[in-house]
Amino acid sequence: MPIRCPRCSTPPPFDPFLCTTCGEHLLTYLDEPLGPGTGVRPDGMADGVAVRAAGGRVPPPYRAGPAPGLEPGQPVGPAPARQPDNTGPVILKLLFGLFVALVLFSEQNVGGLLFLAVVVFALVRWPRARLLPFAMILVATAATIWVAAELVDEIDSPRLFATPTPTPNRAATSTAITIAGTPTLAPAARTATATVVAGDNRVKLSRARARWLRGDNAAALAELNDALTLIPGLGETYNLRALVRIAAGDYEGAAADAERAVAAQSNLVHRDTRGYALLKLRRYDAAASEYDTVLSEPRRDAYVAAYLGRGIARTALGRLLEARSDLERGLRLLPDTDPDPQLADLEPLARRALDSLAPSAGSPSPAASPVASPVASPIAVGTPTP
């Protein structure tokens, strides 16, 4: 039931504290301890019609409860506008900032934490910023932090700030001092250093192979020796140095390098090189056995040098039928193979051995005396002595 004025029984239209018809107080105030009307009523308020007749103005005689800052007779202005509720955009901006920070944190931990601090500062400092400009600023800030972190990672900071190795004071004591430890690189710096060393080693191997193909064996050996100082014990480096040493006539050194290559990484390429070195040392039985292992794989047609080398070794061992098969197959595959000094060395020996396998009329079979026949040792013809 609506409240009515106790004096004129009129329901107040908008003011629950004052009847706009007769001016009666509807609630008890501090200056009316015994209820409405018990206080001293100002003069001129006997007739409450004055409030309505004032046209929305507070009657000048009435001074009981004017609005703060209003003078008597001043029109009552509209109520101040309510501040817009900005809770939704703030939550959206916060969620967007957290998403960008999570993406950045997945790559750069420090960068992600720094970006979170920037998001919190921006939300506190500019809570009413529009969503789209705010998001663009956050993306630009994240990109800047990302680029800065990448640049910092590229700097070799451990080299700049590493603690120097302590030097023992030999004058202070006659006892030998053992240094407890030396500074080590951080994992990221070790990875970067290993990548640089591997790249330098790959460049030196490429240069050495190019010089070997051109016949510049001395320069190729120098590059390979430098490569072994960068990454010692690499099988690929030993394998290429064995081939270069064979081209230079150092068969014993080539065999030693081929053994090291197989010990470091036993694959078909390295075993083919070891068979080639054994062939040049005239250890035909061991060379043929090594070539058997290489040509036992399904992709044996890729190893043309192995067919030629095994055919030459089998010719020297007197296994003429098997030698003919290997020599013919190797020479048939040779035109489709990239040339190199190894094939250039084996091709004339293989052709000479194949030509000598055809028996002439009235001559004994080559298999009758494999040791005395020149065919039995085709590598010895025109081959430099190690």
Image (cartoon, rainbow, N blue to C red):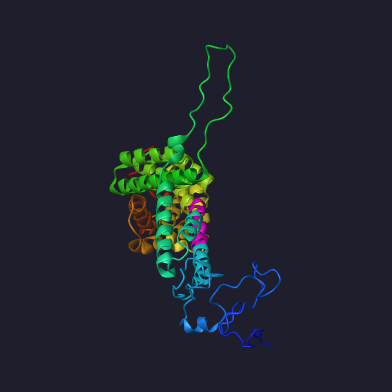
Asked whether residue 263 is drawn in magenta, I would say: no
Residue depicted at x 59% and y 78%: 18
Q: Nearer the viewer, residue 103 or 9?
A: 9
Q: In the displayed image of the protein, which residue is found farthest to the right?
A: 34
- On screen, residue 181 above or below 261: above
For the N terminus, the image quarter is bottom right
- Which span is picked out in magenta? 100-114
Residue 94 in sight from this viewpoint: yes
Q: Position of residue 338 (x, y in %)?
A: 34, 58
Q: Position of residue 284 (x, y in %)?
A: 47, 47
Q: Nearer the viewer, residue 266 or 314?
A: 266
Residue 377 in sight from this viewpoint: no
Q: Count of labels shown? A: 0
Q: Nearer the viewer, residue 102 or 318?
A: 102
Q: Position of residue 248 (x, y in %)?
A: 34, 40
For the C terminus, the image quarter is top left
Residue depicted at x 38% and y 43%: 246
- The answer to which quarter of the image holds residue 251 is top left
Q: In the displayed image of the protein, which residue is found farthest to the front?
A: 43
- On screen, residue 286 above or below 308: above
Asked whether residue 111 is drawn in magenta, I would say: yes
- On screen, residue 59 above or below 376: below
Residue depicted at x 60% and y 73%: 41
- On screen, residue 299 above or below 233: below
Magenta span: helix, strand or loop, mainly?
Answer: helix
